[in-house]
Amino acid sequence: MNRPHDDVEGVSALASDSFSREKARAEVTRRTLISPLEEDPRLSYATEEYSSVIERFVQDHVAAPRMIGKDTRATITVAGGGNAAHVVLALLGSNPNFTVQLWDTLSHEVEAFRAALAANGGMVAVEHPDGKPDTLGRVAKVSSDPADLLPATDLLLLSVPAPFHGLYLERAVPHLHEDMHVGCMVAEGGFDWQALSYVSSVPMLHGARLSIFAMETLPWACKIVEYGRKARISGVKEDVDISVFPRAAGREVAQMINDLIGTQRQVTTKKGTALTEHAYPQLNATTFIESTLMNINSVWHPCITYARFGPHAWDQKTPFAEPPLFYEGVGDIAGNVLTGVSNEVMAVRRALEQAAPHLDLHNVHHVREWVLRAYKNDIADKSTLATSIATNRAYVGYRHPMREVAPGQLLPDERARYMSEDVPFGLAVTKGIAEIVAVETPCMDRVIAWCQGRMGKEYVVGGHLRGKDVLETRAPQRFGITSLAALLRLCA
């Protein structure tokens, strides 16, 4: 069963509203900071004066909040009502020491979740792939108003797609406080720059004990079974990287998240809540620049989509009778595209390491190495990158997002996150870093150019990130990070 707002128009309208505010905010910055002598009037970048505000905030921070353990009484607010949010609510809510809350900006979705909880004793369940008993978690409160939830919150965990990060951060900022952790289930690219651009605008947060963290990718492949009641985990990654600000708190925060959603103890309470034994992935501390470059979704989704629907494979107009298989349909063409783009990402890594030998980028892996590491027990045929994807049991059944243009006639859905999220918050970010370190990216450019054409956007023009819609991305240039020196100062 899909979540109530899976009517695409409602979600798109909210995302567009968030984009509009972000774009307006960036446009004010651009008008204020870009020199009138700028040679290219179309350039949608802020100058480094903008990034210096973020830099000052970073320099002011030296300490993180207290860490939360399984035996710590804490209030945890999960933002978003999607697949991963259901899993996290169940896992965290299964611990009687935690008061777990759900924050969702859509009021009709809040009402639907409340109704489901009322009918299910206030519990959300998650099924596990190993056949062990479901984990049940209690959700104490559901609201669309952050003022109802955040003042008492110790950990805010965003579990929403990247286009909604700005919306939630904007609404959260007035209610953030000292001794608070702000995390994100999937970083995508440039999450730290966006988050820091918001929190640095609040004077009282300068020097406050505050941590910002984000996971490289979801720890699980998961899906809602019944909205507000149950989700199912179909696959578990062996390990996941997590990026942390301040950097010095990386190991502590990674261990905290391992404690919260890692292997659980068996506990029974008088309310019937149980913590069952399940192995969850180890989360390893890394830097944000690593998670941006190692944004696996930004490579996986656009590249596989391009390989299946690009001009070499499809005439761009003939409808399909059914959605093609996504991962199981990966063949040599997709394998070659993925390899080409991943080779370019690795070239960016090498350029950064050459420019700054002190920079630790060992967690930036080629996609072939990544999939074998993340799913080493789930792959039947490891002979090539393509077969490693197509025979991964955690990927079984996934299909390309399609839209119906007539009864029984389907076309690729450009509004789906595989393009609308993973290009502006993924490939475009990596492209921006590549330009700063002077690495050419012809494979990446080809994928971005095709995707932006399908979406009606313009990010890359003539092989350069200079399109009119750069302000809708999280490329470093969007935040005034336009030089290697500025980039490295924010990588520390």
Image (tube, helix red, strand yellow):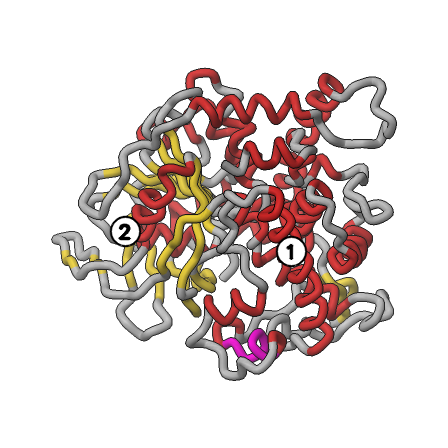
Residue 303 position, x and y percent, is 69, 63
Residues at discs 2 and 1 in contact (Cβ within 8 Å): no
Left or right side of 477 for 241:
left
Horizontal arrangement in the rendering, residue 287 relative to residue 38 (left or right): left
- Give the residue type that dot 1 points to: Val
Horizontal arrangement in the rendering, residue 234 relative to residue 477 (left or right): left
Circle 1 SS class: helix
Q: CA distance from mark 2 to mark 1?
A: 32 Å
Q: Is residue 86 left or right of residue 458?
A: left
Please state the extent of the stretch shown in magenta in the rendering.
Answer: 387-392
Q: Position of residue 422 (x, y in %)?
A: 64, 52
- Judge whether 60 appears above or below 281 on screen: above
Residue name at image x 85 percent, y 19 percent? 37
Relative height, residue 101 to residue 369 (above, below): above
Magenta-span inclusion, residue 391: yes
* Residue depicted at x 52% and y 68%: 371
Question: Which numbered tag is attached to residue 259?
Answer: 2
Task: Write down the quadrant of residue 114 in the picture.
Answer: top left
Instruction: Kindly identify which residue carries mark 1.
Output: 345
Residue 141 belongs to magenta span: no
SS assignment at label 2 = helix
Main SS of the magenta part reads helix
Q: Nearer the viewer, residue 264 or 397?
A: 264
